[in-house]
Structures are given as structure tokens and as C-alpha cells.
Amino acid sequence: MDTKPLRWGIMGCARISRRGLIPGIRGSRSGSLDAIASREQTVADQWAREFAIPRPLGSYEALVDDPAIDAVYIPLPNELHLEWVLRAADRGKHVLCEKPLALDAPEAGRMVEHCRSRGVILMEAFMWRHQPRTLAVRSLLDSGAIGKLRLIRASFSFTMEGDDWRLDPKRGGGALWDVGCYGVSTARLFAGSEPLRAFATAHVGHTGVDLSVVASLEFPGGILAAIDCSFEQPFCCRYQLVGDRGTIEVPDAYLPPQNAPAVAHVARYASEAYLSNTGAQTETLTFEPVNQYSAMVDAFAASVAAGALVDPAEDGLAQMHALDRLLASISG
């Protein structure tokens, strides 16, 4: 296996780069941050000075053409993902692309096939999948700790104000695409399969995007998922797994604390105690603070070394198929 660090370049100076991938790459075991690109050289220069990045580049083309870069991170607005994933792959760059991967499943299919044909890895940037807590919860579930999984609940909401591009339908805006996608990814990961049926209803704002969404998914084995998301509700970020013998609740699910332990609450019922509200054996599991972006960067490097996405990496095409079905039900 090639153990040389992946040499990363970041395409665009987005907020998520500042709080996510820049410290994530720096804190990883497998990567070095070698370049940052902006459409304005002065902006690239400013970020390079602030974060001590060796090469500031004044165009995205310069980044994908740079022979000293192995992998690019694309945090651009959704409507630009297709173009720059294809162009990066054409230059032999592995690609970590922000969610949602594409504007729809056909676009995602083009990306996946193009990257496969060029022999590069394409992964959707769902950092939460690579948290130690997520992996531990999945192990608990697989061990039968709460019995047979019956229901997955997931909520992710915050209030959005102003003229944000995520309120523009032509740019892939909307709460479902931006934060509801986390709940869909959660349901698919823990169900271990793709949904048989999908339905959603929404409050659509004056710009034409969904501002609040409630979605239902049905998976094989009788597993159901209830997902809600919003741009117009107080902050909420959690998921719950409900089995026939207990529950696992995960607060701050997708944004765990950076300087304090992450937790998961487990309730198990013995014998017939689950028939009442008493008798639960409860436990709070704690996990030392881990930069989930660093964990994702290392997981991406493992996929590059393997030549294929390594579980639990997000299959962006399957995710987009599920999102498309939900959006279609909203549109009627």
C-alpha cells in the first residue's frame, strides 16, 4: 500500500473549509494541505497567508492542472459540482465533494461513471459517518443491543436569514438538499439498504425551495425512517434508533462538540419490561473529542489506497436517488 501523504488542494474559499477541511486535513494522519484556489488571486493569497498554505492559486483551473496535487476538495455551490468533479477527474485528481453530490441522480451518475473511467476516487463529504461514535453505534446496533431495528428518527434544523444561495432552486437550494440529506444518509447507513418507498411533504418558501420538510422512508425488513429538517426552526441536530428491545439516542449527531466528549444514550429493556415505561437499563456512552473531518480525510485516503470506496463511505449516487424520490413527492 502507498503510504505517502495525499497532497490536497481546496477549490474555493468556503466557510466549511475554514471550520472543516483545513483543520481536518491538518489534523489527519494521511494528508497535507498544499494549495488553495479562488477565482480571485487576492482572496487565495489572503487565505494562504492566514492558514500557511504553500500555494495560493488564482483559478480553479490552476488547481486541477497542478501536477503536485493528488486530491481536491470541492465545497462549491451545488450547481458547480458536476463541472469541477469532471474536470478534476480528467486531470487524474481524486475528489472529495461536498454534499449533496449533485443536483439530481442523473448528474450524480455522470460523476460516478466519469471518475470510475478515469481511475479516481469520488466520495461525498459526509464527515459524520466517520466519527468513532457513529462506528460504535453501528456496532451496537449490529450486535443486537436494542433488538431488531424498527424505526430511525433524524432531525436537523436551523434558522436561515438573508440572501443565501441555498434559497435559490436553480442552484440546488432547499432544506432537504442541505440538511435533510444527513437524515437520509443516517437512515440508509443504519438500515443497511436502500428505501423501498419514499414520501415527503414540505413548506415551500417564496423563492421556490423547501424551507421545512418531513419525510418518511420504508426499508426492507420493516424498518421505517422519519426525517425532518428546516431552515426556519430552532437548531436541532440528533438521531434516534428504536429497536424492539431498546433505543439509542445521539445528540449533536452531525456536529459533535470539538472540545468535550461526544455522547450516546442507550436504553435496553430486559425480558418483558419493554412493554411498560419502567425497567430500562440506561447507559451513557462517552467518546473522546475527535475531529470528524480528519477522520473523513483518513477514510478518504484509505479508499484511495484500496482503489474503491471503503465502508462506511457515502455512495453519492444511491444517496441522490433517495433524495430525488423525496423531492419528487414534494413536487407532486
Image (cartoon, rainbow, N blue to C red):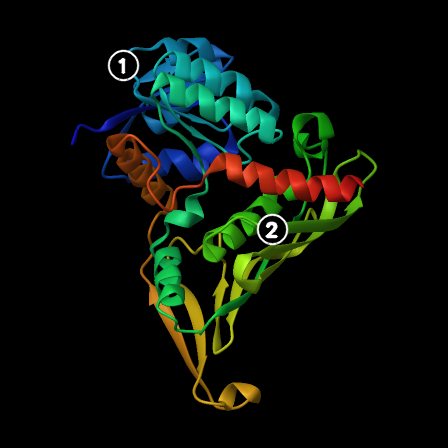
Residue visible at 83% across and 37% down? 206
Labels in figure, total: 2
Q: Position of residue 241 (x, y in %)?
A: 51, 66
Q: Amino acid at mark 1?
A: Ala
Q: Position of residue 117 (x, y in %)?
A: 39, 18
Q: Is residue 204 above or below residue 259?
A: above
Q: Is residue 128 above or below residue 331?
A: below
Q: Secondary structure at mark 2?
A: loop
Left or right, 10 with reference to 183: left
Left or right, 1 with reference to 92: left
User: Where is mark 1, residue-wise?
Assistant: 68
Q: Is residue 165 above or below residue 54?
A: below
Q: Position of residue 147 (x, y in %)?
A: 44, 74
Question: Is disc 2 surrounded by few (<14), some (14 to 19) or many (20+) residues within 10 Å?
Answer: few
Q: Amino acid at mark 2?
A: Leu
User: Where is mark 2, residue-wise?
Assistant: 196
Residue visible at 53% across and 27% down? 109
Label ID, residue 50: none
Whether residue 59 is visible to the viewer of this picture, yes or no, is no
Q: Secondary structure at mark 1?
A: loop
Question: Is disc 1 surrounded by few (<14), some (14 to 19) or many (20+) residues within 10 Å?
Answer: some
